Amino acid sequence: MSNNILFYTRREELALSLNGRKNNIKKKDFNYFAGRLLINEKALLVIFNNFQRTVPFFNNLISRSFLSETMKEKYLNLIAQRYDILFS
C-alpha cells in the first residue's frame, strides 16, 4: 500500500531523498540516481521501457482488484502521475 494514499496529509512524494529532493521529483532526478549507480544510458532506457510496458498490466490489475472504487481511483491516479513524471 502506498504511503501517498494512506497518509494523504504527508507532503513528501518519497520517504528517502532522490538527488537531494523528496518532492517534485522529475525524470532528471532518476537519471542522476542511475548515473550514481553507474547504470549506463542504454540499460536505463531498457528499465524505463519495461516500466512503460507494465503500466497497462498494473492498471488492469488494480481495476479488477477487490479494492473499493475510491481506492482504485487513488491508485490509478498515482500511477498516472508517476507515469507523467517519467514520460511526458
Image: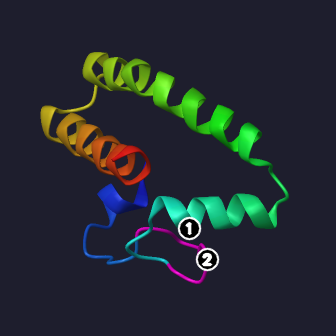
- Circle 2: is it few (<14), some (14-19), or many (20+) Cα within 10 Å? some
Query: Does label 1 or label 2 sit earlier along the sequence?
Result: 2
Residue that protrudes farthest toward the bottom in the picture? 20
- Residue 55 lies in the magenta-colored region: no
Q: Which residue is mark 1?
A: 29
Q: Which mark is residue 71?
A: none
Amino acid type at mark 1: Asp
Element type where label 1 sits in the image: helix
Left or right: 28 with respect to 39? Answer: left
- Helix, strand or loop for disc 2: loop
According to the image, label 2 marks what residue?
19
Task: Decide: is 37 above or below 64.
Answer: below
Q: Residue at x 22, y 41 (%)?
A: 71
Q: Residue 51, percent across and down?
A: 54, 33
From the viewer's side, name the closer residue of 31 and 82: 31
Q: CA distance from mark 1 to mark 2?
A: 6 Å
Please identify the residue farthest to the left as the structure is shown.
70
Residue 15 belongs to the span the image colors magenta: yes
Estimate how packed mark 1 is, as few (under 14), some (14 to 19) or many (20 or more) residues with alpha carbons within 10 Å: some
In the picture as drawn, the residue positioned furthest to the right comes out as: 38
Q: Is residue 54 left or right of residue 46?
A: left
Residue 37 percent location from the top left of the image = 82, 60
Estimate the x, y position of residue 76 in percent, counting from the top left.
26, 37
With 5 as the anchor, is 35 left or right in this view?
right
Q: Which residues are magenta?
A: 13-21
In this view of the protein, which residue sits in the foreground, 16 or 31? 31
Residue lying at 30% horizontally and 48% vertically, measured from the top left: 78
What amino acid is found at the position of numbered circle 2 in the picture? Asn
